Image (tube, rainbow, N blue to C red):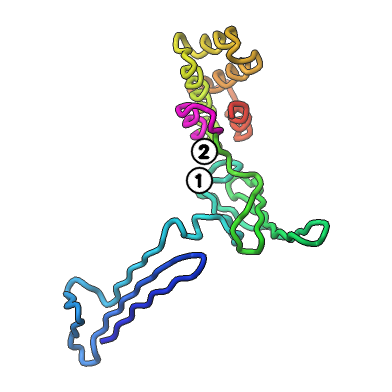
Amino acid sequence: MCGRSPSFSSSPLTAKVRIVVFCTPATGTPSHTARNIDMSETRRVLASYQVSAQEDPWRKPHLFQHLNLHRCPHCAVASPLLSRIWEGVTVDYTGQNGKFWVSYVCSTCGGIITAWSLRDGGEVLDMYPSTKLVDESIPDNAADYLQQALDSLHAPAGAIMLTASAVDSMLKEKNYTKGDLKTRINQAAQDHLITNEMAEWAHEVRLDANAQRHADQAVTRPTTEDAQRSIELEA
């Protein structure tokens, strides 16, 4: 019988790995351990892994060959393939404070993301463009619609409809609940809750969303850039 049960950790990552291997002797006769293991329920190799999710390095983007992001900052596609296409080092005017830069390209939209760290392979300290998040001052329901719109930029028709839902929710939050969306936008402008320019934008989003909702064949399908413009005005 042979057994192995290593346990190790490395800093800053704390990862414990336990591997237990059970072998039979050369004679082929099953051997028994002090724990009286039922061999009918085991296999030749038993392995268990214990890794802290909070300390998993893959949950934080690093300057590897591919940048690990939940969504592309440009098109918001989930689990994007972001491949390294350029790298370089910069320093300040004193020749100090070096930064290692890497640029990545999204295979879906072709957008470029540039990130930097203190070394190649290091944890990303900042990147451009950064991941878009909804302002905390926006009410919860409207913020939820708006975040969904941000996460759906790769599907611009859906993103625009979600933005219209955010407009609708914002007005309801201010107790504008009577009538259709057009009526409530106009009433909010008359009450000086929103400016005339904001009302014009809200109507534009409303009409764009209606066109997509009813599959108006006379209307050109929106692009990711169209959806971004709608969302950015609200956000």
In the image, residue 8 sits, relative to residue 113, either above or below, namely below
Q: Mark 2 belongs to which amino acid?
A: Asp
Residue drawn at x 59%, y 30% as measured from the top left: 235
Closer-to-camera residue (231/214): 231
From the top left corner, tell me how far across and down residue 178 is, in percent: 45, 9
Residues packed near mark 2 inside 10 Å, few (<14), some (14 to 19) or many (20 plus): many
Residue 54 numbered mark, or none? none
Q: Residue furthest bottom?
A: 27
Instruction: Determine whether, in the image, residue 198 is placed left or right of residue 160.
Output: right
From the top left corner, tell me how far across and down residue 126 is, in percent: 64, 50
Q: Which residue is mark 1?
A: 78
In the image, residue 193 sits, relative to residue 117, either above or below, namely above
Whether the magenta-drawn stretch holds residue 49 is answered as no
SS category of the residue bearing label 2: loop
SS category of the residue bearing label 1: loop
Whether the magenta-drawn stretch holds residue 142 is answered as yes
From the top left corner, tell me how far across and down residue 79 is, in percent: 50, 49
Q: Earlier in the sequence, mark 2 or mark 1?
A: 1
Q: Residue furthest right?
A: 93
Kindly check if marks 2 and 1 are in contact, taking CB atoms under 8 A apart as contact: yes
Write down the region rendered in magenta: 135-148
Where does the N terminus fall, quadrant-wise? bottom left
Q: Which residue is mark 2?
A: 151
Residues packed near mark 1 inside 10 Å, few (<14), some (14 to 19) or many (20 plus): few
In the image, residue 90 sits, relative to residue 19, either above or below, namely above
Cα distance in 3D space between marks 2 and 1: 8 Å
The chief SS type of the magenta part is helix
